[in-house]
Image (tube, rainbow, N blue to C red):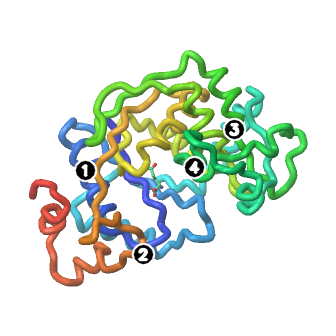
Amino acid sequence: MITRFAPSPTGPLHLGHAYSAMLAHDMAMAAGGTFILRMDDIDRVRSKPEFEQQAIDDLHWLGLSWPTPIMKQSRSEPRFRANIQKLAQMNMLYPCSCSRADIENAASAPQEGVPTHGPDGRIYPSTCRHRVMADFQEGDAIRLNMERAVARATPLPHYEETGARYSGTRQLDARDMITSIGDVAVARRGMAAAYHLAVVVDDHAQGITHIIRGEDLFEATRIHVLLAHLLGHPIPVYHHHRLIRDDTGKRLAKRDDARAIAKYRADGATPNDIRRMVGLPAI
Ligand code: GLU
């Protein structure tokens, strides 16, 4: 079993991150496997070296260890480009110049029973779908033509979920992928890859067998399974865990500095105090 914790170093780690990282570490250790730390720093503007160092310090303090040197996604760009090339050769990508405002304006008026938003945000209204990769212009995003992708990926893969909300085998559904997800971006303006492609490519490069992360990514997982299948990767097992919430029931965000691990450390908490706070057994 190889698990990973892959924070984006865009803010301090909080209790939710601590839970995710410790759970992935505990599960790997219990199975005699390996826990990997990766820095998902593809967002060059928001990622900061000081957050990366602080995350490493906090995770060591929590008692976690991992093989070094760690992988940084900002260095994976050649691999992202190679995989985009592969999908382009299957003729299922197109360049897209739409801004957020263009997408909002082009989106049709809501119709009953037709979703407007999916796990990748506003479902793209396919404005640029007629374009071909040969027309790619500097500053374009790159999108997956979902209809072609599911046609190519048929029979659609099954995958295993072991999380809190659902445990069992799930299978991708073609209609559902088209209507509730749509043409997701695999690369964003000025970036070699968008989140979905980046995690799939690097999880494969690192041989991750079990993906343990928050249930906010439960639905987006279908995009990851589809991409992995198209790229010919084995599909990992997914475990989506409950989210750690604040006293009002809202899930914690990076800006919740009050729950930053560093803050608890400064206040004299021990790693076992943190484990108890997030509902993990003390060790
Ligand atoms: N870097 C991503 C994040 O910080 C990882 C999410 C995932 O587990 O795929 O949310």
Instruction: Check contact, mark 1 vs mark 2: CB within 8 A.
Output: no
Q: Earlier in the sequence, mark 3 or mark 4?
A: 4
SS category of the residue bearing label 4 = strand
Res 36 visible: no
Residue type marked 4: His
Disc 4 target residue: 117
Residue 23 image label: 1
Closer to the eye: label 1 or 4: 4
**Which label is found at residue 144?**
3
Q: Nearer the viewer, mark 1 or mark 2?
A: 2
Q: Amino acid at mark 1?
A: Leu
- Graded by Cα atoms within 10 Å as few (under 14), some (14 to 19) or many (20 or more), the crowding at tag 3 reads many
Q: Quadrant of the N terminus?
A: top left
- Viewer-side label of 1, 3: 3
Q: What secondary structure is found at the residue carrying circle 3?
A: strand
Q: Which residue corresponds to the image point at 37% horizontal and 47% vertical from the top-left? A: 4
Residue 113 appears in view: yes
In the displayed orientation, state which residue is furthest to the left: 282
Which quarter of the image is occupied by the C terminus?
A: bottom left
Q: Can you give x and y, in whole percent of width and height, for residue 63 in the image?
A: 21, 61
Q: CA distance from mark 1 to mark 2?
A: 22 Å
Say whether marks 1 and 4 touch (CB < 8 Å).
no
Q: Which residue is identified by label 2?
A: 255
Secondary-structure class at tag 2: loop
Q: Amino acid at mark 3?
A: Leu
For ligand 1, tell me if the residue under mark 2 lies within 8 Å.
no
Q: Secondary structure at mark 1?
A: helix
Label of residue 141 in the image? none
Q: Position of residue 194 (x, y in %)?
A: 62, 51
